[in-house]
Amino acid sequence: MIEAEGLSKRYGSTVAVNGLSFSVRPGVVTGFLGPNGSGKSTTMRMIMGLDHPDAGGVSIDGQRYHDLRWPLREVGALLEAKALHPGRSAYNHLLSMAQSNSIPRSRVDEVLAMVGLTAVAKRKAGKFSLGMGQRLGIASALLGDPGVLLFDEPINGLDPEGILWVRTLLKSLAAEGRTILVSSHLMSEMALTATDLVVIGRGELIADTTVADFIASNTEATMLVRSPDLAGLSAAIQAIGGDVRPGEGDSLLVTKVGAAAIGDAALAAGISIHELRELQASLEEVFMDLTSDAVDFHGTTGATVTP
Amino acid sequence: MSAIATPLAPLDQGRAGFRQSLVAEWTKFRSVRSTWVSLSILIVAAIGLAALVTALQANHWKTGTLQDRFNFDPLRYSQAGHFVNQFVVGVLGVLIVSAEYTTGSIRTTLAATPRRLTVLLAKGTVLTAILFLLSEAVAFISFLLSEAILKGAGGMLLAPGTTIRGQISAAHAPYLTLSSPGAAAALFRSGLFLVLLALVAFGIAWIIRNTTGSISLFVGILLVLPLILQLLPSSFAQPIERYLPINLGTAMVATSTRHNDFAGTLLSPWAASAVMLLYALILVGIGAWMLNRRDA
């Protein structure tokens, strides 16, 4: 169980995390979702006591990370794939971690075998590919057989086989009753692995819910309607209480009123309609919609995220 | 079946403390190549330069002026490796810390041992212990080698109670033994100087955290500061110069009999040792304070 309460952190004048409160329960995979730069990594560093919060706090099973007696046996983390010395072998990297928490040496061989790195264990970790580095990071997270696991963007750099392996691993770790927090900027990935969701944007909480509820409560039926007289149609729809946004080409996106009401309003106004259908919002679109205001760094193409 | 091969037996007692951190830091220290490169350079430079400088000075005795002979200091020649090794131990003291920051492995380290001073103490202990053993060993070995060279060249023992003046007209350069007055203590301080210098670098690295910056500052204090002082009026510079690490090193390696020659410009050998120790403690102390305060 991870509980954050009013967690806040600023770097100079930049607010990285602001008044963030959420909880992560054991037994399921919790997705920690937000655009790049939204404060996910900062939050994870604060959970692990690496960065000091300016206000608020976070506890792991009721204890501050700093007070854990055997931290690696209680919390495992994949913070950055390569939080290691590139000149040190994978084996020695894991061995020094094991020694720091009185974890038997045999355990190092076990986790290396689990992630499939036994053959390259004596090679310098700096020579590893991104995927191998990620596997080593996962091995170090699992080293202490911890009840709480934090994974920061674990599928980065993995091939499809590796991605599938991580998904299966995360679910089976959760099924054993562990608390799993997985950060990602990919909603689609979370839709496949996570049960719960903590969504943040610009360091603030957007949602702390389940994936199912998140979709249900945020997917508002949107109607797409095409017409040669968009101005007239727009006025007619607004007159019956609909919200209208311009769509692509000669189309409008309408919320709050249904297909029947739009059709009737168009008929009454004498405007012809060329297309009228309901748009199915994907989880990805919901996420984009929700966080678009909270994205700090838009692309430079000038395109906005929402239609 | 568990996703994690076999469950780990829980530990009910103790905590991830100094003892665990010490073993882990030793593993980290011995498992990177820079450690072994540095330590090899340290040994080769100490013994190689001792032999070279002593042999050349012994040879020069025959043709040198009386002033050259008067300045003849066999113990100092045996410690000529310091000119290289002060930088070697500096780099080692910096890297043991800065490598963690530049590679990001500090986050792994502090996640494993969240009590940060424990990490600093463990790293400091590994650095101090290894360098103490090695520096003392090479200080004495270099000395024995140098004196053997002088003796082999036909020199006479510089008898206790006599100074170089007494042998100034001898045919060959005189030599010392470990029982020569002040020699053993000077050699002990010679090794100690390298250890304290490494701790100065260690403290700087906790403050600066970045390898290039830390080494630049270290070299600046050692080499650039003396040059700047030379540009200042001597009435201003002279009282300060004796407190420069490089001059403290010279003072620490002096035997008490030789020390008379430097009277007035250097601190006494043990006072110099105490000042070096103070520098190391202050810098490591500031580093420790910043480590606790800052984000990793």
Image (cartoon, coloured by chain):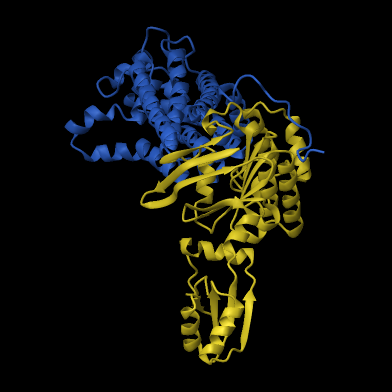
Chain colours: A yellow, B blue
Q: Whole-percent x and y of residue A30?
A: 63, 48
Left or right: residue B220 versus residue A181 is: left
Q: Quadrant of the N terminus of chain B?
A: top right
Q: Whole-percent x and y of residue B274?
A: 36, 19
Near-viewer residue (A260 or A55): A260
Q: Whole-percent x and y of residue A33?
A: 58, 54
Near-viewer residue (B142 or A1): A1
Does the image show residue B32? yes
Left or right: residue A38 versus residue B226 is: right
Q: How many marks are shown on the rendered structure? A: 0
Left or right: residue B293 versus residue A261 is: left
Left or right: residue B186 versus residue B109 is: left
User: Does residue B112 lie above or below A150 as drawn?
Assistant: above
Near-viewer residue (B89 or B94): B94
Task: Please name the residue shown 75% across and 44% down the image.
Answer: A172
Does the image show residue A250? no
Residue lying furthest right: B1
Near-viewer residue (A8 or B15): A8
Q: Whole-percent x and y of residue A121?
A: 73, 42
Task: Please name the residue shown 55% across and 21% down the image.
Answer: B133
Q: Say which quarter of the image contains residue A108.
A: top right
Q: Say which quarter of the image contains residue A163.
A: bottom right
User: Does residue B243 lie above or below B229 as drawn?
Assistant: above
User: Does residue B243 lie above or below A127 as drawn?
Assistant: above
Residue lying furthest top: B161
